[in-house]
Image (tube, rainbow, N blue to C red):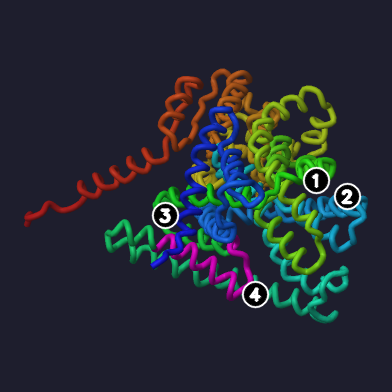
Amino acid sequence: MEHNISLITTIAAALGLGLLLGMLAVKLRLPALVGYLAAGVIIGPATPGFVADVQLASQLAEIGVMLLMFGVGLHFSLDDLMEVKGIALPGAILQIAVATLLGMGLAHWWGWSMGAGLVFGLALSVASTVVLLRALEDRGELDSFNGRIAVGWLVVEDLVTVLVLVLLPALAGVLGGKSEGGGGSLWMALGTTLLQVGAFVALMLIVGRKLFPWFLWRVAKTGSRELFTLAVIAAAVGIAYGSSHLFGVSFALGAFFAGMVLRESELSHRAAEETLPLRDAFSVLFFVSVGMLFDPRVLVESPLQVLGVLAIILFGKSLAAFALVLALRYPLNTAITVSASLAQIGEFSFILAALGMSLGLLPEMGQNLILAGAIISIAVNPLMFKTVGPLQDWLRKRSPLARQLERSTDPLAELPMSVEHDRLTGQVVLVGYGRVGRRIADELTREGVHFVVAEQNRDIVEELRKRDQPAVAGNAGEPAVLIQAHIARASMLVIATPDTFHVRAMIETAKALNPAIRCVVRTHNEEEARLLREDTGGTVFIGEHELAKSMTRHVIETLENAPVVGAH
């Protein structure tokens, strides 16, 4: 009996060749994903020799997207999303509009129809969440403020793309493609989509937040690691599949919300660890599948068109995002990080291109150019992240305009003159107002200790000022922020942010302006804690250690106060 082993062959070829070329890429000091993309090109239909099953590879890649987005949801709470809505919502929508117009202008120059230009521009405007997450994880910035903004920005992009995918068939006839409905179908499609997405989000937030964590606890009580891992993966893939077929939401968004509701469980960290190997393996399959779709001949036959596409992806929408973030009065570092995050395209771009072709809107050349832009931008994106620090330093030194845009016109970057002098002498400077920072602030307030908050989230700073709490907006790694917090007269610097990237710069500035200041830092890493103690001389708290001490103290106090067993 003959067996069909195309699935096994595809997985073996993708992972095996991906491993070899990934190692070669790392040896050449390139990102490993460049090797994965090259592996896809080699086993794809556009090159001679062995050809893997493209359809199977794309489905395996979809599973990778689900698992990766599920992992993001496990680390990204609804509160995190709400914290960055002030920048992610207007920023993403305006950036999509700018990039779409740039794509339409380029398509018009080539003589394409308006419908083709619209699909083409939209495909170039949406970045790949998968690529962004890999870059943020490699840099250790997934949980940082800039990381949350970038992820929130792309979540908004995904929501907008879901609406576009639903509305495009209804608009196809008007745009010169295959008509799929009358004029009234547009509003019907929009209303139906909004209702479906709204129903899904409400169901997940109201029912899912209670049901799925409870279910995870029930499985954990069995004591079986296999069942626990199976439950986590089944929840991620099952919710993603159900959200797509019942509510019209994309697999990626469905898996993201699945992770968000499971985050309510205290087992969320264990769930993230259990799924990490599978997420890594399937993310490799995602990049390989992207390479399989690419036809290298487009680089030879249409080099100028490819350069035009890359100009929009790497520079056009990145510059638009850079200007938008600065216009919203966020720091220079945030603007550069968000710009680097958007300098690529991925999974949604392929879906849009395929839909545009099926509706008779996008020519085949358009899909080839989109794929070429995706391949090159994904390969270049990690290198662009490496330029964030040097570019930031260069702009601050060489561009007075950048410094002026970042600080001088921002009212939240300076403390109000109305703050009393005695509240700015001997005060505590609290960097970061997240979950840990809020608890520290509450205790300081309860004890009557004056403090000034330094926080990058402008919405939080505005809310604190409404409550008459001194706060300044900006990255405390910059001397100007700590100067505004009156660090020279402070008694203590407390760094409560999980982002340890700028900790040394904060402490160096604080001690240069106030040699007697005492510094307190939080971290989750033993090695990082040791280095921070050696380099800064500050007091470093490790989250796990403090939790263990608190639990041990509670146990001892309970035992001391408990009656002796057998006593009368």
Kindly indicate whether the residue at mark 2 contacts the one at mark 1 (C-beta within 8 angstroms): yes
Q: Residue 106: give its label.
A: 2
Tag 1: amino acid: Val
Q: CA distance from mark 4 to mark 1?
A: 34 Å
Earlier sequence position, callout 4 versus callout 1: 4
Instruction: For marks 1 and 2, give the CA distance.
Output: 8 Å
On residue 309, which mark appears? 1
- Residue labelled with disc 3: 271
Q: Quadrant of residue 194?
A: bottom right
The three-letter amino acid code for the residue at tag 2 is Leu
Do the numbered discs 4 and 1 sit on residues whose CB atoms are within 8 Å?
Answer: no
Mark 2 element type:
helix
Kindly tell me whether residue 395 is visible in this rendering: yes
- The vertical placement of 298 against 155, above or below, is above
Magenta stretch: helix, strand or loop mostly: helix
Which label sits in the foreground, 4 or 2? 2
Which residue is nearer to you in this view: 40 or 466?
40
In front of the other: 423 or 548: 548
What is the three-letter code of the residue carrying label 4? Gln
Question: Which circle's residue, 3 or 4, is located before the other in the chain?
Answer: 4
Examine the structure image and report whether residue 241 is included in the region drawn in magenta. yes
Q: Residue at x 42, y 65 (%)?
A: 2
- Region of the chain picked out in magenta, as a range: 231-253
Q: CA distance from mark 4 to mark 2?
A: 35 Å
Residue 236 on the magenta segment: yes
Q: Secondary structure at mark 3?
A: helix
Disc 2 or 3, which lies upstream in sequence? 2
Q: Separation of disc 3 and disc 4 at Cα?
A: 28 Å
Q: Secondary structure at mark 4?
A: helix
Q: Quadrant of the N terminus?
A: bottom left
Q: Which residue is mark 4?
A: 196
Asked if residue 74 lies left or right of residue 102, the reply is left
